[in-house]
Image: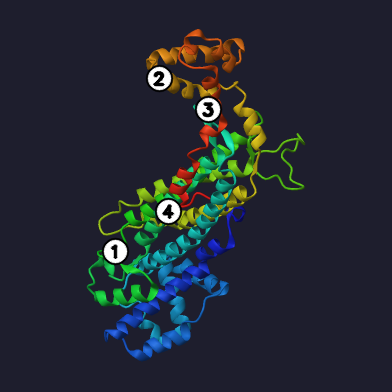
């Protein structure tokens, strides 16, 4: 992923040096397992542990130099280790195949990437929760089809976001469990040259679970679940970002991204304050969905394995995790510093002269004995007068003889009280956050 959309902590998990360190760890853990089973000498393990050392950028460059000849990355790595360690290195990779190293180390990387993503999720959820309680009773126009529906509160909207984020976090945790597996079962996965106990030792040492059964590779439905979980979190962030973009529109202007000192919105129009952060999140979410599709395409491999998945994963592994990590922290900062305009929300609530209370009047007429469809006609015809004639809705109701047969003027006015739409927020917040205040 390009530096513009990368945070160093996540990007470093995918560096060449980090990859070779994990390969080293897998190989050394496997040799430990072999020694424990009497399949390799202890002095070879001690020699490899003493000489394997760390990996640097210069080491990575040397491995790449070797690979230009071998055309095989794991063989290039093993060749380099042999150069460094000497004769004892012949015991490394004994009975193993390249995918034992590649898939086990990939499981490590994906597992660790989820741990960073969960930190980002926690920051986002904390920001959304704080702003939700801040605006628990801030009345706002609820919209369906983009049209005024009934009042909600801005805090209610954010509580819905929080609940969705929690589901996304749960999916990531499940995906972490699914992907944190390793395999040291050899070519085509039969353990023909190493017993399962070696695999068990490697996985226990590295904090993974052994794949219950594997071919030459760990099965790619696991990876598809992982990238789908990432894409779903991205889709949620996009949903929230699209809402902020709508609320920032000039005609609405109920909430707005932060606009920092010195920031410029347009090279041509100095007045512009554009929702660039939200638009960026919308675009990046599209990439994550594409990566999920690519991961699903990787599930079907030929027989016990091919490497059609390899090139895909070299791209989508770092790109998807780095992108979502970036998106989470960008969105968290957006929410933490988002500008909210309650007065503009109130102005928009009053824009249609109270017709958004039509359902309350409909229900009250029904409770008082009027047939529902007849009540609907009475309320609708007065609401339409506001749209078509500009007549104040409440005044139109108070002049409607059919309505006044069922309701007093005071009862009509009661249907316009704003507190009606906030009275259940304690119950909603108790459900979502486990507390009402």
256 vs 65, nearest the viewer: 256
Quarter of the image where one finds residue 273: top right
Q: CA distance from mark 4 to mark 1?
A: 18 Å
- Residue under label 4, please give it: 312
Residue 96, percent across and down?
A: 31, 73
Residue 405, percent across and down?
A: 47, 11
Return the mark for residue 216. Answer: 1
Return the mark for residue 366. Answer: 2
Residue 20, percent across and down?
A: 47, 71
* Mark closer to the chain start, 1 or 3: 3
* Vertical comparison of 286 with 214: above or below: above
Front position among marks 3 and 2? 2
* Mark closer to the chain start, 1 or 2: 1
- Residue under label 3, please give it: 146
Image marks 4 and 2: residues in contact by CB distance under 8 Å = no
Q: Looking at the image, which residue is at 42% across and 63% down?
A: 111
Q: CA distance from mark 3 to mark 2?
A: 28 Å
Q: CA distance from mark 4 to mark 2?
A: 61 Å
Q: CA distance from mark 1 to mark 2?
A: 69 Å
Image marks 4 and 1: residues in contact by CB distance under 8 Å = no
Image marks 3 and 4: residues in contact by CB distance under 8 Å = no
Residue 287 appears in the picture as rendered: no
Front position among marks 1 and 2? 2
């Amino acid at each position: 992923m390009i530096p513009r959309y990368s945070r160093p902590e996540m990007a470093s998990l995918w560096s060449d040096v980090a990859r070779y360190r994990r390969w080293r760890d897998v190989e050394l853990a496997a040799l430990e397992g072999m020694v424990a089973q009497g399949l390799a000498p202890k002095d070879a393990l001690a020699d490899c542990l003493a000489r394997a050392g760390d990996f640097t950028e210069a080491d990575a460059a040397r491995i790449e130099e070797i690979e230009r000849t071998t055309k095989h990355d794991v063989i290039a790595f093993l060749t380099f280790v042999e150069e460094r360690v000497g004769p004892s290195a012949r015991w490394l990779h004994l009975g193993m195949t390249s995918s034992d190293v590649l898939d086990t180390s990939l499981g490590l990387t994906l597992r660790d990437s989820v741990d960073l993503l969960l930190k980002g999720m926690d920051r986002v959820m904390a920001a959304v929760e704080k702003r939700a309680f801040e605006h628990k009773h801030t009345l706002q126009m609820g919209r369906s089809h983009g049209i005024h529906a009934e009042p909600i509160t801005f805090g209610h909207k954010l509580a819905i976001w929080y609940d969705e984020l929690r589901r996304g976090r749960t999916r990531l945790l499940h995906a972490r469990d699914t992907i944190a597996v390793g395999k040291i079962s050899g070519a085509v996965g039969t353990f023909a040259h190493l017993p399962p106990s070696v695999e068990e030792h490697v996985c226990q040492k590295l904090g993974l679970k052994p794949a219950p059964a594997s071919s030459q590779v760990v099965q790619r439905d696991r990876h598809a679940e992982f990238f789908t979980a990432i894409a779903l979190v991205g889709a949620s962030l996009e949903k929230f970002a699209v809402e902020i973009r709508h609320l920032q529109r000039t005609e609405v202007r109920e909430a707005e991204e932060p606009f920092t000192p010195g920031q410029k919105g347009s090279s041509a129009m100095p007045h512009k304050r554009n929702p660039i952060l939200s638009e960026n999140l919308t675009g990046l979410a599209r990439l994550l969905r594409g990566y999920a599709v690519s991961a699903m395409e990787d599930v079907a491999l030929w027989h016990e394995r091919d490497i059609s998945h390899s090139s895909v994963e070299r791209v989508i592994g770092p790109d998807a995790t780095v992108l979502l990590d970036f998106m989470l922290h960008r969105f968290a900062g957006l929410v933490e510093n988002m500008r909210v305009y309650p007065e503009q929300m109130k102005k928009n609530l009053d824009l249609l002269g109270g017709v958004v209370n039509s359902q309350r009047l409909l229900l009250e007429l029904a409770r008082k004995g009027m047939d529902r469809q007849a009540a609907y006609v009475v309320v609708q015809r007065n609401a339409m007068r506001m749209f078509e004639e500009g007549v104040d809705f409440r005044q139109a109701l108070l002049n409607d003889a059919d309505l006044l047969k069922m309701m007093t003027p005071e009862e009509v006015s009661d249907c316009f009280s704003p507190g009606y739409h906030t009275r259940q927020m304690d119950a909603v917040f108790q459900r979502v956050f486990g507390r009402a205040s």
